[in-house]
């Protein structure tokens, strides 16, 4: 794989980039996040773990403004995402890219257009600039020859590589990864995880990752956050969380998944 030309925006320092303060999110009577507080420093790779339904995906969806909290404050780079005007939300959102479990590519667009669409429409890049950027990223993810393919002509692993290239094409400061290998055939998982390991190693992008791939989490994470009952119940280095967890719930969870 070619080394990417730093898709993440340069980060001035390694201070705090993302902050959730007292965030509560309910779906009807189900309180999914309960006065949640946590922060992520710029350039760090943070993995969210916890039982099914503990709200991990909801946290990523809040950052993508796909859903709104009921209470609390979310800031990214010192700018409020909530509460904030729609205009401010859109500005903050430009710095955040997400890769979904189900790829979510535009089926009616060729691969190249899938990647150039947002840089042209959202960032205002010229078609030529966006295409040059897209080709560089396709080269990086090993799909330089697939510019003219439609997503349905690609394997799941290839589609997920395109989705990763599409997220990076916006040169976001933050990359959100939501169980990105869960929908892949087992033989395709390792290739996608290796690509993400390379991105984590060679760029300064901040990563927030929900995964059930604990070896991957151990490899890439600077910090692991364990969620339960709508809160972070334990956080620490992967060595600490996977090797010597303090909380009984963390031990139970890891005992069940590893
Ligand atoms: N749009 C929605 N409407 C109603 N309930 C929802 C909605 N989205 C999520 N939930 C509920 O919120 C809770 C948290 O869901 P979320 O997907 O964030 O959990 P998770 O920790 O990512 O789980 P998993 O590991 O299984 O993916 C679950 O109980 C889920 O059913």
Image: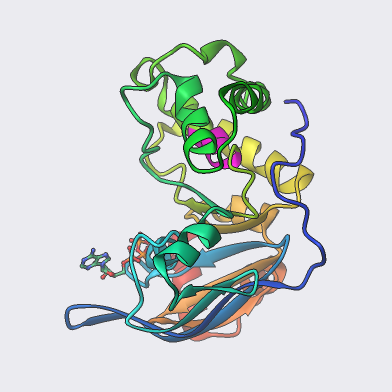
Residue 164 forms part of the magenta stretch = yes
- Residue 24 in percent (x, y) is at 37, 84
- Judge by depth and name the residue closer to the eye, 241 or 24: 24
Residue 251 is at least partly visible in this image: no
Q: Is residue 208 visible?
A: yes
Scheme of image coloration: rainbow
Whether residue 215 sits left or right of residue 48 in the image: it is right
Compared to residue 22, the image places residue 226 above or below, namely: above
Q: Is residue 142 above or below residue 180?
A: above
Q: Nearer the viewer, residue 184 or 95?
A: 95
The correct choice, above or below, for 140 with respect to 175 in the image is: above
Give the prevailing secondary structure in the magenta stretch: helix
Q: Is residue 31 left or right of residue 163?
A: left
Residue at point 33%, 65% (across, down): 67
Name above or below for residue 8 compared with residue 241. above
246 or 114, nearer to the observer = 114
Residue numbers of the magenta segment: 163-168
- Judge whether residue 29 is colored magenta: no
Q: Residue at x 78, y 31 (%)?
A: 3
The residue shown at (44%, 70%) is 50
């Amino acid at each position: 794989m070619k080394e990417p030309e730093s898709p993440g925006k340069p980060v001035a320092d390694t201070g705090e980039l993302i902050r959730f303060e007292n965030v509560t999110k309910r779906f009807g009577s189900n309180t999914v996040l309960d006065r949640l507080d946590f922060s992520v420093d710029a350039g760090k790779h943070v993995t969210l773990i916890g039982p099914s339904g503990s709200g991990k995906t909801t946290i990523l969806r809040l950052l993508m403004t796909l859903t709104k909290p009921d209470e609390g404050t979310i800031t990214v780079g010192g700018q409020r995402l909530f509460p904030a005007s729609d205009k401010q939300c859109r500005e903050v959102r430009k710095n955040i890219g997400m890769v979904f479990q189900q790829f979510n590519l535009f089926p009616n667009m060729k691969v190249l257009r899938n990647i150039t669409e947002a840089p042209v429409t959202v960032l205002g890049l010229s078609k030529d600039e966006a295409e040059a950027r897209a080709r560089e990223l396709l080269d990086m993810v090993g799909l330089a020859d697939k510019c003219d393919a439609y997503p349905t002509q690609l394997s799941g692993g290839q589609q997920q590589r395109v989705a990763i290239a599409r997220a990076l094409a916006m040169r976001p400061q933050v990359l959100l990864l939501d169980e990105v290998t869960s929908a892949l055939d087992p033989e395709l998982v390792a290739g996608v995880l290796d690509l993400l390991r390379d991105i984590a190693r060679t760029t300064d992008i901040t990563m927030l990752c929900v995964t059930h791939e604990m070896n991957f989490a151990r490899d890439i994470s600077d910090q692991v956050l364990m969620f339960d009952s709508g809160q972070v119940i334990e956080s620490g280095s992967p060595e600490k969380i996977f090797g010597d967890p303090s909380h009984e719930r963390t031990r139970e969870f890891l005992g069940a998944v590893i």
